[in-house]
Image: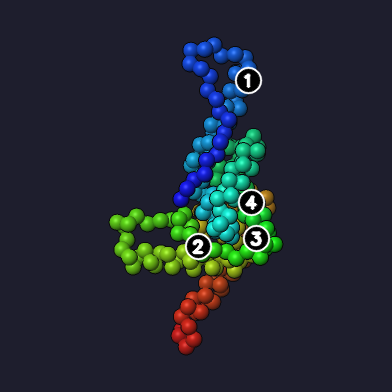
Amino acid sequence: MKHPDIHLDVTASALGQPVARTELREAPARARALDLQSLYDSHFAFVWRNLRRLGVPEGRLEDAAQEVFLVAHRRWQSFDAQRSTAQTWLFGIVVHVAHNERRAGRRRNARMAPASEHEFWDSVPSDAAGPAELLAKREAARLLERVLESLTDPGREILVMVDIESMSVPQAADALHVNLNTAYGRLRNARADFQRALKRLRAQQEGPGKS
């Protein structure tokens, strides 16, 4: 998977030169840029796979991921590490970008491409499983994608956050900007919808006349 570059304007002062007052004023900005670059490096895969899980078509993933980090760049000063984790904060942006992409896709009457196997479901090292296990994992990823597609947007978002990314319900509520009771209600409904959709799809795979 090719990770597109994010170009941040970070310029180091020349070695051995006196630090001007303007450079002192610019130091916090440079530090923020470096922190954002670190965020990009460490969370690109997280952003990519969750855009995919939230319904962004394969052909739009690269641009959507770039948009997430551009928004993060613009909003960087609003991030409060004492209030939320970087993942929680980023996921809120992912949800917003994915929503816009789905809305644009519906306007274009776009069809989602087949699921990519990178990052959608955590990869398994080749020496950790044989062909049968790898095939089963790929089939499970495809089935998961189909089930997620059947959920409402709010249900899909909180289910991905809590049951797939292992965030807490309070973290999900914070990222989605809803109160805690609403978050618990969405999760409860989404889990029930997920089980019904999973049962229906499995029955379709088994075919008529099979239990």
The mark nearer the N terminus, 2 or 3, is 3
Q: Could you tell me the amino acid type at mark 2?
A: Ala
| Residue occupying the point 65% across, 60% down | 105
* Residue 86 coordinates in the image, percent (x, y): 55, 42
- What SS does tag 1 mark? helix
- What SS does tag 3 mark? helix
Query: Image height check: is 83 above or below 204?
Result: above
The mark nearer the N terminus, 2 or 1, is 1
In the picture of the structure, the residue carrying the numbered disc 2 is: 115
* Residue 70 coordinates in the image, percent (x, y): 62, 42
- What SS does tag 4 mark? helix
Label drawn at residue 97: 4
| Residue occupying the point 56% across, 36% down | 7
Asked whether residue 47 appears in the rendered view, the answer is yes
The mark nearer the N terminus, 4 or 3, is 4
Label 4 Cα crowd, 10 Å radius (few <14 / some 14-19 / many 20+): many
Label drawn at residue 25: 1
Query: Image height check: is 21 above or below 49?
Result: above
